[in-house]
Image (cartoon, rainbow, N blue to C red):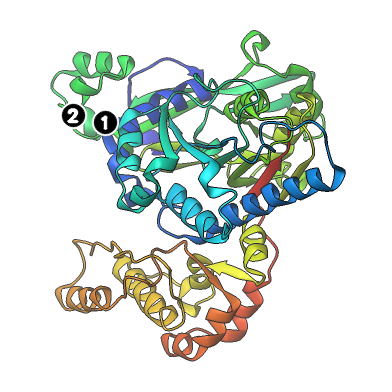
Amino acid sequence: MLQDADALPQLIGDYKSVDQWQVHINKLFYRFRGDQVRSFYQTFASADYRLGHALAADYYEAVIKRARTSQSRNLPGRSSTLDPQSPLTVLELGCGNGNLAACFLSHLKTLDREGTVYPRVKYILVDWEQGVLDAAMRVPELESHRDRIGPLCTTVDRLDGIADGTVDRILCNELWNDLPTRLMSRQGGEIEEEFLRPNLSEILHAKITDWAGFVRAFDAGDFEVLKRFPPFFEDLVWEREYRTVDWKDVPYRKTITEFLRRIDEQVVVPINLGAFATVKEAKRVLAADAAGFSALDAGTSDLKVLNDPDKPCSGQFGGQQSFMVNFALVEAVARQLHTGPISIESQREFVGKSLNTNVMTVMDLLATHPAAGQKMRPWEQDRLLLQTIRALNKAYESPYAKEIDFPIRPDTPSEEREHLQALSRDLKPSGIPDAVAYVTEEELTACSHDLEEVGYDPQSFFIALTAPPGPVDYFHMMILP
């Protein structure tokens, strides 16, 4: 967020709770920049396949184990999920670009050699933006699974059209941090929350001739009118103040209040109301013996981290407002809702466990390079990334052919531009798909000499390979019904 106190920002809205402005801004972001999301950030399922494969393997094992347990107990009555002829409904909340669905279904089909699971699966892609659904359904990788998939345009807190107790598995990848979140803290005997008021920078204000028209369109979220004005996301300036929480529109008051007693006074923590709503809805739609709800996102369950007043509660990605997930509070709310067993593990451990090896992301690897601690020009960062991917590709082999999309920055010097273009052209389609792809210990070992030539110290990245999760990291929360 731009926070220049000397910019004489111009007011364009009233004070509202954080979640209200988050919803408003994110709706506008997806209308304006929904097709450019990967230019601002990448999810672990945008292009890589290993998270989708790990989720498929986990689901396949759960279904097979459930069937074997039923047979060994010789249960007289079968639930719908145990009937070998009945469908198995899998929901993906927030379907992204469709890559997770494609990788999940492809790997599930490969694992299911006897054809007892995949033919029963009905995979429903859920999103509240019809355009996102349409684009995901069109991806070529889903073509071979056309008879197994279907779209559902609805909000994730109210899954219209999904009956109670009919779903076997829910996947929710990097969605919770995009859902309504409030920021609260303890102030004496009161609970306060953050309110925001938006302004526009003086620079952009000077470029807008119809100021009243812009303010009206911004307040109404009128995309058709706003697109006539200059882009504004990077020029928003936010004022903050704190007010006593009005509990009439905040659920789980007792659970939230008790949780905040464990947090020091005046330390702000995220209250992920949207995540709570998905857990409640998941409990409604999941079958009694369902394989559960997998939520994968960035956040923490560590109270020491949550008690840190300097922790990063939120972030901005091209205008989209994103908040870290307070997994500890989500777990407390889930227990209030009387869900079944809950587990939280690092996402890296979840993926590594499915491969029976240690894994790290390309970004983790880049962080171990000696140049990472120095100030690098943007094109130098691009060069290091491309050189790293080229080295890793000596050992990395994806089962999916996918051309890596690597635009060269306009400000790259001409001689470097030619070099970067040559590096990009040399990348194989079955290689590393993006900077957040997972690589295994075996792949790192096999290409350690090539990485040394790029400047890496193998000892450093092998230490990082087994390092514990960071204070705020990506986690996998599994909730059983």
Up the image or down, 366 lies above or below 4; here it is: below
Quarter of the rendering containing residue 411: bottom left
Q: Is residue 420 left or right of residue 337?
A: left
Other residues around mark 2 within 10 Å, as few (<14) / some (14–19) / many (≥20): few
Q: How many marks?
A: 2
Which kind of residue does numbered mark 2 sit on?
Answer: Ala
How far apart marks 1 and 2 lie (CA) works out to: 6 Å
Q: What residue type is labelled 1?
A: Glu
Residue in the image at 74% along x and 45% along y: 66
Does 213 sit above or below residue 321?
A: above
What residue occupies the far top of the structure in this picture?
248
Q: Name the residue under label 2.
A: 206
> Which corner quadrant of the image does residue 410 belong to?
bottom left
Where residue 381 appears, x then y in whole percent?
Answer: 36, 70
Percent from the top left, x then y, of residue 24? Answer: 40, 23
Q: Which mark is residue 410?
A: none
- Element on which disc 2 rests: loop
Disc 1 + disc 2, Cβ < 8 Å = yes
Residue tagged 1: 202
Q: Is mark 1 on a helix, strand or loop?
A: helix
x%, y% of residue 400? Answer: 39, 65
